[in-house]
Amino acid sequence: MRVFGSADVLIPQNISMEDWAVIACDQFTSQPDYWERVKKRAEGKPSTGELIIAEVDLKRNVEERVARVHMAMNDYLKRDLFTEYKDCYIYVERTLLNGDIRRGILGIIDLEAYDYRPDSSSPIRASEQTVLGRIPVRVKIREKAPLEVSHVLMLADDDRMSLIAPLTAHKDDLPLVYDFELMENGGRIRGWLVKGDEAKAFDKRVSEYMIRETHRYEDLEGDPVLFAVGDGNHSIVTAKEVYEAEKRKHPEKDFTNDPLRYTLVELNNLYDDVQKIEPIYRIIKNTDPEKILDQMKHICADNGYPVSWCSGDREGTVYLDPERGQLAIGILQDFLDYYLSHEEGEIDYIHGEDVVRELAKEPGSIGFLMDPIDKKKLFPSLKADGPLTRKCFSMGHAREKRYYLEARRIR
C-alpha cells in the first residue's frame, strides 16, 4: 500500500493562472458577493471555478450545475489545455498576506489507507467529524468526472522537520512550474517539479517517517495515525465513497493501478512554524440570543473553558464545564446541536472574527468565538479519542485556504 506517493499531475499552460486558480469551495459561504466576483472575473476564461460547485450555490439548480462541471472538464481535455507531469510531486510554497510562507508537497494518497469513521484504525484519519449531508452532491460530480482538482491539505506529525524541509533547502535546483498571484488577495503561490532522484529521496524520508510514527504515542490506546486530513476532508470522503462504490460494482477487478483508488492532496508539516491552527467560529441566525445564553447556563462552571459571545452591540464570556469534554469547541457544538434540534435557528461556520462580529449585529443573531487548539495535542487526540467535533479548526484564515490549481485524470 502506497500511503502517500507521486502522481501524474496536470497543470494548464498558456492561460492566465490568476484567473484559473479558485479558492476552496467551502469558503465564504455567508458572503455570496465573494463568489459573484470570482464568477465575473473568470467569465469566458479557463477556470477551476467551472470544475467545482461552491457550497454557496448548493441550493440552486444542482443537477444543471453538475452537468456543467462535467462539460467543462471534457472541454478542457479536448482543448489540450494541460501539460501532464508524469510520476512526480510538486513542491509548493504559498506566500500568505502577512509574508509567511507555507510549504507543502503535492502527491496522492491511497484511499485504502483512509477511513473517516469515528472508530477508524486506518493510517490516514479525518481530523474532524464528517458531515455526511455534504457528500451526495460531491459524489454526483466525481462519479462521472474525468478530472479531479483538489483543495485538500493533509498534515504530517513531523516534529523532526525531516520530510519537506530538505526540498525547501534545494528548491533552486528544481524546475519551477508555476509562479503567480492568487485572486482575491490570496497571496502568491509557486510550485517546483520533484522527479527522479529527488522524488526517490523524498519517498525514502516518507517511509522512515511512517516507521517512526508507528511507534509514537505508544502510551496511548489506539492504532497509529500517520497522517491527518487538515482541510478538505469531505473531498476525500467523496473520493472514498466513489471508489468503494466502484469496487462493489466490479468485485472481480484489480484496482491496484486504478486512478479512482487515489486522490490528490497537499502534505504539510503540522510543526512548521507557519502552520497555524485557527478556530472556526459559530454564528447562529434567526434565533433568540437571550434564550440561547439562558440555556447555556446548564453547561457552564466556574474556572471552565472560556468562550466569548457577541450579539448586536453586546458581548460577553461564558465558561464551559470541563467535565463535559476535553475541548471547549466540542462542548459548545454538542450544546448547539441539541438546542437547534428543539428551537429555531440556523448555524453557520465562520473563519474570521471580524466576519462573526459583523454578522452577529443582525437582529436574531449571536456569534461564538473560542481559542485555537494546541497543535501538539492533535495527533495524540486523534489516536486516543478519534476525530474532533465537526468544523473544529481551520488551517489558517479563509483567504489562506488552498486554491484549486493542479488537476489529475481519474478516468
Image (cartoon, rainbow, N blue to C red):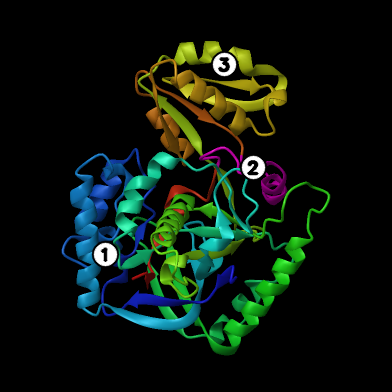
**Residue at point 20%, 67% (across, down):** 45
Closer to the camera, 328 or 146? 146
Specify whether residue 214 is in view: yes
Q: Which residue is mark 1?
A: 47
Task: For the N terminus, give its image quadrant.
Answer: bottom right
Judge left or right: residue 333 versus residue 61. right
Q: How far is the residue under mark 1 from the one under mark 2? A: 35 Å
Residue bounds of the magenta highlight? 372-392
Q: Neighbour class for label 1 at 10 Å: few (<14), some, many (≥20)?
A: many
Q: Is residue 382 magenta?
A: yes
Task: First in sequence, mark 2 or 3: give its number.
Answer: 3
Q: How far is the residue under mark 2 from the one under mark 3? A: 22 Å
- Label placed on residue 373: 2
Task: First in sequence, mark 1 or 2: give its number.
Answer: 1
Q: Neighbour class for label 3 at 10 Å: few (<14), some, many (≥20)?
A: some
**Residue at point 34%, 58% (across, down):** 142
Percent of width and height locating residue 188: 43, 66
Q: Amino acid at mark 3?
A: Met
Circle 3/circle 1 CB separation < 8 Å:
no
Q: Which residue is mark 3?
A: 296
Q: Amino acid at mark 1?
A: Ser
Specify whether residue 27 is in view: no
Q: How far is the residue under mark 3 from the one under mark 1? A: 45 Å
